[in-house]
Amino acid sequence: MAGPRELDPSSSPRAMLGAELRFRRKQADLTQEELGAPLFVSGSFIGQLEAGTRRMQPDQAREIDRVLRTDGYFERNCAAATKSKYPDHFAEAAEAEARAEQIKEYAPHLIPGILQTEPYARAIFRALQPTATEPTIDGLVSARLDRGKLLDDPTKPMLWAVLDEAVLRRVVGSPQAMAAALQHVVQLARRHRIIVQVLPFSAGAHIAQGGGIKMMSFSDGPPLAYVEGLGTGQLLDDPAAVSRYQLSYDLVAATALAPAASLALVESMAEDYAHGEH
């Protein structure tokens, strides 16, 4: 019997690793739940590894090699499959975002990364890393703009963003950069490519005031929730946690302005910035 092939890091290594995991698991006549048990993870998590939605960690790779008797294959190739151009705390979420059928996000402070323009993103990264070299900032900006290319597809992923009013009023970069950033959001919404709502200050206290929420759903796996803090992030697949964050998002969306009124407000703010009236 032929042994498993080595991964080519240039040809979607995460997908290849997942496909090999599925093949070896079935060859061992194990269900996803049976393979997950010795790793202390759910069967759905194994399914996400096989689909490439989740990244395999080195300790998981070693245990998979032991259970499936694959002679260190997964441990050897785990590093290639976890390489990412994104910061460690966001890498897994960015890769899940790229596979999602639907993305629903509440943004409390900044325009969501997938919607950012180059000057806006550059101002953010320069503020976060004031002593970084220009090539470092260039790389971060490039990776962020690459995320926006997901919206080049006319229908997928479906993106529904709820922006806190603070997002509109916090000047990032310059008034001109803000005008362009908000106009970009307006253009996508006018083309019916995204849904945008604004949560106004007048809404007062709300369930998600502790931070942002990103919900992602997939055609080939269970939904995920991503929550982020300063330099940290957590991708959650526990059904109870995902359900809790989904409810939080739903309540925020229900409290926000209707899409038409929200779009009018974003457009008005963009015009104010463009004419120096902010």
Image (spheres, rainbow, N blue to C red):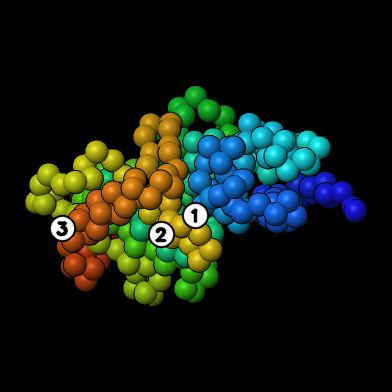
Point 45% across, 27% down: residue: 130
Numbered badge on residue 103: 2
Q: Which residue is mark 1?
A: 97
Name the residue: 49% across, 36% down. 89
What secondary structure is marked by label 2? strand
> Label 1 amino acid?
Glu
Discs 2, 3 touching: Cβ within 8 Å:
no
Q: Element under label 1?
A: helix
**Camera-side residue of 52 and 21:** 21
* Relative height, residue 273 to residue 83 (above, below): below
Q: Position of residue 186 (x, y in %)?
A: 33, 66
Disc 1 packing (10 Å; few <14; some 14–19; many ≥20): many
Q: Position of residue 42 (x, y in %)?
A: 50, 46
Q: Picture coordinates of residue 159 (x, y %)?
A: 39, 63
The residue tagged 3 is: 255
Sooner in the amino-acid sequence: mark 3 or mark 1: 1
CB contact under 8 Å: marks 2 and 1: yes
Residue in view at x 87 percent, y 49 percent: 3
Identified by mark 3, the residue type is Thr
Identify the residue at image location x=21%, y=54%: 252
C-alpha gap between disc 3 and disc 1: 25 Å
